[in-house]
């Protein structure tokens, strides 16, 4: 049983335990906890679907979404002896078991509050959808090596992988939608980058995050289109709503530590104040607070990928109005730093040096140093039996510094193999030399403007200098190409600030003619600003941030203000058997990009007339762009419960949903370097239907979905030729995803639970267009009509068993074994075009045979009919033992946990493709394109890259609780 959970809450019997949105009725949630003795009997007397979930960390019951959700592995059954509360009728002195407090109130007042809360619980029974709830067991199964993304893999249709321990470059897809197309929230507050639309952006490497796995109590995954009251900004793939860890009911201190494979260790503490009776409140109105800190370090299972994470949370809960209202404050400060693989390594390199090999940092590396801060102020006010109101205010900032370095010897002219690569392959680094673009910089070249960006790597690092061996410089000079020296290291700094407010109102009018309603209205207003991401080039690591080596960046930057309003009305008809939930979301965004040093802006007159600009040309100057987008997004859900019509079908519900959602173009599209107008929002049209069966020991969920994306975003960057430095952004693409999902949880005995889910997905492009081909979004390319989306498994499945035994070795102890296997089916992969193929008309590109068509298709990624990643299955095991202690002074319990990932040490590829690496290649000397630049992807050989999955790892953890 979770700490602070109502003693009677049998989550196995609820299976798909219903969760209530705090904006709907925090008062009900609080009273359900406070009056746990009464509530437990009421729940057992009703359909279990009306039960409310409780916090995994402490007594506040806190559901977070407006849909009934199926937990793929709800927590184990609580034995009946535990489930029976001490007090089953309210008395002045009877302790409320869920809250763990004595309520000094008259009996009549307690009964009145209970009746009101009970009535609101019935009114808040929400309609089901394909949402999935993951809780404490899933968090523990993920272990300290997991992340807030890896836990999502326990839900149907979610594919997740990462290249490191913890939050290290996580990648995910939901029903085939990319991570940058999925929104994430923490307690209803948007956590994604509003400037880029979804949860991430193109080449947005991540170490650390705004919140971490040990700072949450659970998560609700809503694929496709969420209910209007649960939606957030910028998503065509779904909404992931994480629930923060809250203060416990009892005063206690936890000290914990872990030691694991690959030099991984973690240590920290958590202090819970319990109820602070005093001037701020007594009893049920007493405030509680929590402080938690953890530090984790690892050297990583891939060579030379160390990482370190520091995570701190402060949480404060203040109930009031006899526990019917609640104020919460949450503050998070997290840091993450380390090295990562900028791009999967050539498989030939891994075959030669080892499956988990990586370049030595003296040869090449990419690193990040990130800081994240989040402040959330949330208040939910119970006004009367018909109205509750709430408001949330928030502020977030993130600082990210990325550095990329490759030794000049790593590169070779004309796409040849460098000093560290096997023949036929070439290294990749996220800097000008890594993209073969060094010839665009320096005196007399494209991005050199007097008084603007004057960095010249050739003069800073000439042949024979310490960072530019003569042999390297001479080799490039003999090939007639610019040396990579001075452009082989790059550092960029990004800062974003986000603040906003989310008011909400829930109205439950009196029943009229047997018709009940629950009306929810609310809004989200937020603004995010970003800097210009100043970027510096250099020839060694530890790059100095001085104006003399700045190659991009300016005063000003992007910003986006978004406005969202929603309306949702749940109508219950025919004795509460038919539920119709119509609603809509109205969104608007005001986006802009301004600056004085943007390539493609208006060049100052004095500079344009200078001798240098007259001879070589100048293209950097002031620029300002603005765009207003708005969308109307309808939604409807219809559910029919068969309980009263067919008693034999008790617990069975049929449902169907239809709705739209939108994703807006990233603010980077507003740059003058983009050819053409800024794309309009992408729109997803979702239809899903399903069956939910929920009884005391069996929960089954089956659904079918169809999602069609119109105006799908696509982009292309010119890295050579007359349009070098320019980009094309379009939304001419289309995608369609359809599939089936199923989840089953069977409580065989009070100790044994079986669980499993599976999903099947068909994900294809419906038009030939520019696209971000890979789910990881590290490559842009061309999708052809009918081709599958790459990097998306066709089949996913999770199966497992959970065994729990109380008083196994000593009275009151708790022993739990959780064993699961996760199957990932075949995935399509990609390869790079050479520029000679005719893939048909491409919006925004010239016709086949033209230089523009060649330059856009050479190196572009597309579906590989001869590729693929073989299916694999990974098994995990978690052993947990909770040992209470008596007569040990302040030490109350010890907890031991052994977590094993990839139990049988299966080798598997997480990500794989064939590619042509960018290289400086010179000009055509003959043929129809004579004199034109060879595409940066026009002279390398094609080779395969791969990212291996995590091998077997074991982590041992200990937690000591003092109280």
Image (cartoon, helix red, strand yellow):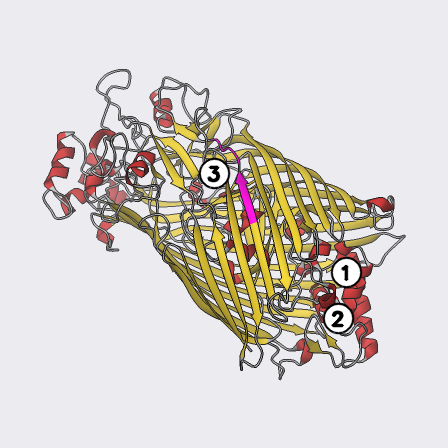
Q: How many marks?
A: 3
Is 30 placed above or below 654 here?
below
Q: CA distance from mark 2 to mark 3?
A: 50 Å
Quarter of the image for residue 794 reads: top right
Give the magenta-colored segment's residue range. 820-828
Q: Nearer the viewer, residue 338 or 278?
A: 338
Residue 824 drawn in magenta: yes
Look at the image and tell me whether residue 190 can be seen. no
User: Mark 1 and mark 3: span between their CA atoms?
Assistant: 41 Å
Looking at the rendered structure, the secondary structure element under dot 1 is helix
Residue under the image location 47 percent in, 58 percent down? 144
Q: Neighbour class for label 3 at 10 Å: few (<14), some, many (≥20)?
A: many
Write down the residue under mark 1.
121
Identify the residue shown where x is 50% and y is 58%. Answer: 213
Q: Secondary structure at mark 2?
A: loop
The answer to whether residue 618 is above or below residue 850 is: below
- The earlier-in-sequence mark between 2 and 3 is 2
Residue 823 drawn at (x, y percent): 54, 40
Q: Is residue 883 left or right of residue 480?
A: right
Q: Is residue 261 visible?
A: yes
Question: Label for residue 85?
Answer: 2
Earlier along the polypeptide chain: callout 2 or callout 1?
2
Assign a secondary structure to mark 3. Answer: loop
């Amino acid at each position: 049983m979770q700490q602070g959970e109502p003693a009677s809450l049998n989550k196995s019997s609820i299976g798909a335990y219903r969760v209530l949105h705090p904006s709907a009725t925090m008062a009900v949630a609080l009273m359900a906890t406070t009056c746990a003795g009464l509530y437990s009997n009421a729940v057992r007397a009703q359909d279990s679907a009306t039960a409310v979930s409780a916090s995994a960390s402490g007594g506040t019951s806190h559901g977070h979404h407006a849909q009934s959700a199926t937990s793929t592995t709800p927590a184990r059954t609580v034995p009946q002896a535990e489930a029976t509360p001490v007090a089953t009728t309210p008395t002045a002195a009877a302790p409320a078991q869920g809250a763990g407090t004595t309520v000094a109130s008259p009996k009549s007042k307690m009964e009145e509050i209970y009746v009101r809360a009970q009535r609101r619980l019935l009114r808040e029974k929400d309609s089901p959808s394909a949402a999935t709830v993951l809780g404490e067991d899933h968090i523990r199964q993920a272990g300290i090596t997991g992340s807030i993304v890896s836990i999502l893999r326990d839900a149907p249709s979610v594919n997740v992988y990462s290249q490191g321990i913890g939050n290290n470059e996580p990648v995910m897809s939901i029903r085939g939608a990319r991570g940058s197309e999925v929104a994430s929230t923490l307690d209803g507050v948007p956590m994604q980058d509003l400037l880029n639309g979804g949860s991430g952006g193109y080449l947005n490497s991540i170490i650390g995050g705004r919140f971490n796995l040990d700072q949450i109590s659970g998560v609700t995954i809503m694929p496709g289109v969420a209910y209007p009251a649960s939606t957030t900004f910028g998503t065509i793939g779904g909404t992931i709503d994480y629930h923060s860890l809250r203060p416990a009911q009892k005063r206690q201190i936890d000290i914990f530590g872990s030691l694991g494979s690959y030099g991984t260790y973690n240590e920290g503490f958590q202090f819970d104040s319990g109820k602070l009776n005093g001037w701020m409140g007594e009893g049920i109105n007493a405030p509680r607070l929590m402080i938690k800190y953890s530090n984790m370090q690892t050297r990583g299972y891939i060579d030379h990928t160390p990482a370190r994470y520091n995570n701190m949370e402060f949480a404060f809960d203040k109930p009031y109005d006899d526990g019917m209202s609640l104020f919460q404050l949450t503050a998070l400060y997290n840091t993450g730093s380390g090295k990562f693989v900028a791009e999967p390594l050539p498989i030939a390199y891994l075959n030669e040096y080892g499956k988990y090999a990586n370049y030595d940092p003296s040869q090449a590396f990419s690193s990040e140093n990130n800081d994240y801060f989040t402040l959330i102020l949330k208040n939910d006010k119970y006004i009367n039996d018909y109205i509750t109101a709430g408001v949330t205010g928030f502020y977030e900032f993130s600082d990210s510094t990325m550095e990329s370095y490759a030794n000049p010897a790593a590169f070779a002219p004309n796409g040849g193999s460098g000093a560290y690569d096997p023949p036929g392959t070439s290294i990749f680094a996220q800097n000008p030399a890594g993209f073969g673009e060094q010839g665009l910089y320096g005196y007399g070249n494209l991005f050199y403007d007097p008084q603007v960006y004057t960095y010249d790597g050739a003069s800073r690092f000439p042949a024979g200098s310490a960072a530019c061996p003569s042999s390297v410089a001479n080799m490039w000079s003999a090939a007639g190409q610019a040396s990579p020296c001075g452009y082989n290291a790059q550092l960029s700094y990004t800062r974003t600030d986000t603040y906003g407010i989310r008011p909400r109102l829930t109205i439950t009018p009196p029943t009229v003619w047997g018709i009940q309603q629950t009306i929810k209205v609310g809004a989200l207003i937020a603004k995010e600003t970003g800097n210009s991401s100043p970027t510096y080039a250099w020839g060694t690591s530890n790059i100095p941030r001085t104006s003399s080596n700045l190659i991009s960046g300016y005063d000003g930057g992007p910003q986006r203000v978004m406005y969202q309003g929603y309306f949702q009305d749940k109508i219950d008809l025919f004795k509460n058997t038919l539920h119709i939930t119509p609603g809509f979301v109205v969104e608007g965004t005001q986006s802009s990009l301004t600056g004085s040093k943007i390539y493609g802006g208006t060049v100052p007159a004095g500079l344009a007339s200078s001798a240098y600009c007259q001879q070589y040309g100048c293209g950097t100057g002031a620029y300002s762009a603005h765009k207003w987008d708005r969308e109307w997004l309808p939604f409807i859900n219809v559910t029919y419960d068969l309980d009263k019509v067919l008693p034999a079908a008790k617990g069975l519900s049929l449902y169907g949903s239809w709705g739209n959602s939108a994703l807006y173009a990233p603010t980077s599209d507003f740059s003058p370097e983009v050819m053409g107008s800024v794309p309009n929002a992408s729109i997803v049209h979702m239809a899903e239907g399903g069956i939910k069966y929920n009884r005391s020991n069996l929960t089954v969920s089956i659904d079918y979905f169809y999602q069609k994306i119109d105006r799908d975003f696509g982009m292309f960057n010119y890295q050579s030729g007359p349009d070098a430095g320019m980009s094309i952004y379009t939304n001419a693409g289309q995608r369609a995803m359809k599939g089936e999902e199923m989840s089953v949880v069977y409580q065989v005995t009070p100790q044994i639970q079986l669980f499993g889910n599976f999903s099947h997905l068909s994900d294809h492009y419906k038009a030939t267009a520019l696209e971000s081909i890979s789910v990881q979004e590290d490559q842009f390319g061309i999708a052809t009509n009918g081709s599958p989306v790459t990097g998306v498994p066709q089949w996913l499945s999770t199966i497992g068993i959970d065994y729990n035994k109380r008083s196994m070795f000593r009275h009151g102890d708790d022993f739990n074994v959780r064993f699961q296997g996760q199957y990932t089916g075949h995935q399509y992969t990609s390869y790079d075009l050479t520029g000679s193929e005719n893939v048909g008309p491409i919006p925004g590109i010239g016709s086949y045979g033209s230089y523009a068509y060649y330059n856009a298709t050479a190196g572009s990624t597309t579906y590989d009919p001869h590729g693929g990643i073989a299916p694999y299955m990974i098994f995990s095991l978690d052993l947990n033992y909770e040992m209470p202690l008596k007569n040990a002074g302040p030490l109350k319990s010890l907890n031991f946990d052994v977590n094993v990932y990839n139990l049988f040490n299966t080798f598997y590829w997480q990500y794989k493709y064939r590619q042509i690496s960018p290289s400086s290649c010179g000009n055509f000397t003959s043929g129809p394109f004579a004199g034109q630049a060879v595409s940066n992807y026009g002279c390398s050989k094609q080779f395969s890259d791969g990212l291996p999955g995590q091998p077997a790892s074991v982590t041992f953890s200990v937690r000591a609780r003092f109280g």
